[in-house]
Amino acid sequence: MTDALKRLSDEGVAIWLDDLSRKRITSGNLAELMDQQHVVGVTTNPTIFQKAISEGDGYDTQLTDLAARKVTVEEAIRMITTADVRDAADIMRPVFDATDGRDGRVSIEVDPRLAHDTRATVAEAKQLAWLVDRPNTLIKIPATEAGIPAIAETIGLGISVNVTLIFSLERYRKVMDAFLTGLEKAKERGLDLSKIHSVASFFVSRVDTEIDKRIDALGTDEAKALRGKAAIANARLAYQAYEEVFSTDRWGALEREGANKQRPLWASTGVKDKAYKATMYVDELVAPNTVNTMPEATLFATEEQGDIRGNTVSGTYEQARADLDAVEALGISYDEVVQLLEDEGVDKFEASWNDLLKSTEAELQRLAPSEG
């Protein structure tokens, strides 16, 4: 078998796993994926934790203790999720040390119900960083309008951040600006910039899902020719924006102080349409200094059938712009689509969080000690 994952890693794409559960940690599976599949990071979100906690009995011992202490369901969730992230961070620590903090990172997200509250998001980011208490944690903050200043403030406190739910090129530029602003604040506070890391999670497959749906509704041959092109074009133009911002004088001044570039992270890279090759959002987004966080199915698909043929992003910007312009010419509004996807993304994570609250509450009640 050709080692496509190693080739991907050699091209400068850090392979992160978009999943976590206690079973992965305790069974040795996460360590095995690091050893065998070149996994060098982990991302989580409310949906991932909701699935992990509601399936199997891996959390029963901790839940029994939490039930005995009569903690609130929200405290229980924080204790459970931060424990998983802490343990995963410890497993990842050798990678963190070997890469000087660049990889070996585990992400945990602020409560999605705070997505439109700047001050609460910053407070939650500080609390999560304190609770997990590992240098290789990334606190996930959504790139909503309220999230942008929260990102700048959190980075300014020296807390490393994974900015999530980025769909639009305009919002991505605001994210990078917030990152630079945060570094400038951190410098003013006398913090060591070399210790601050960040990734910007640019979502991929959901863009095609929404635009393809609108293309199919039009039904013309001209429209159908653009199926499956918008998401990759969008991500490639995001990389162009990244190259521009991180070649400015403003960035240069921070880099001389030891700052690290905020890497683009390709998120939502599992294909949603079975008509597409399972590795499409991996093969077509190979570029230096990026991260691709993959669901397990995409990770193994890449290992088996990935077509890693060098940098597939640089030099594609003209065609990428033409593809997005062609979609717009069909009457499909880019701005409308990306705003819808952001709103849906926040709503989905909030719904998962509410499901997590309900299922955890049920488990606490089931495991509560009997009175008397």
Image (cartoon, rainbow, N blue to C red):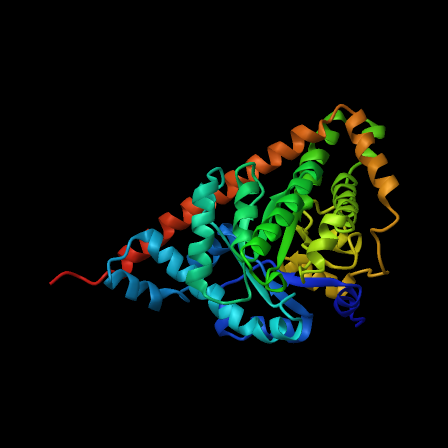
Give me the residue at 76% from left, 39% from top: 230
Quarter placement of the C terminus: bottom left
The image quarter in which residue 63 lies: bottom left
Residue 339 seen in the current view: yes
- Residue 219 or residue 100, whichever sits in front: 100
In the rendered view, would you say 8 is above or below 148?
A: below
Quarter placement of the N terminus: bottom right
- Residue 63 or residue 93, whichever sits in front: 93
Give me the residue at 62% from left, 32% from top: 339
Residue 278 seen in the current view: no
In the rendered view, would you say 221 is above or below 2?
A: above
Q: Residue furthest top?
A: 331
- Residue 79 or residue 177, whichever sits in front: 177
The image quarter in which residue 333 lies: top right
- Residue 185 or residue 284, whichever sits in front: 185
Apparent side of residue 207 relative to residue 307 in the rendered image (left or right): left
Q: Give how far across and how far down residue 95 sits, in percent.
A: 63, 73
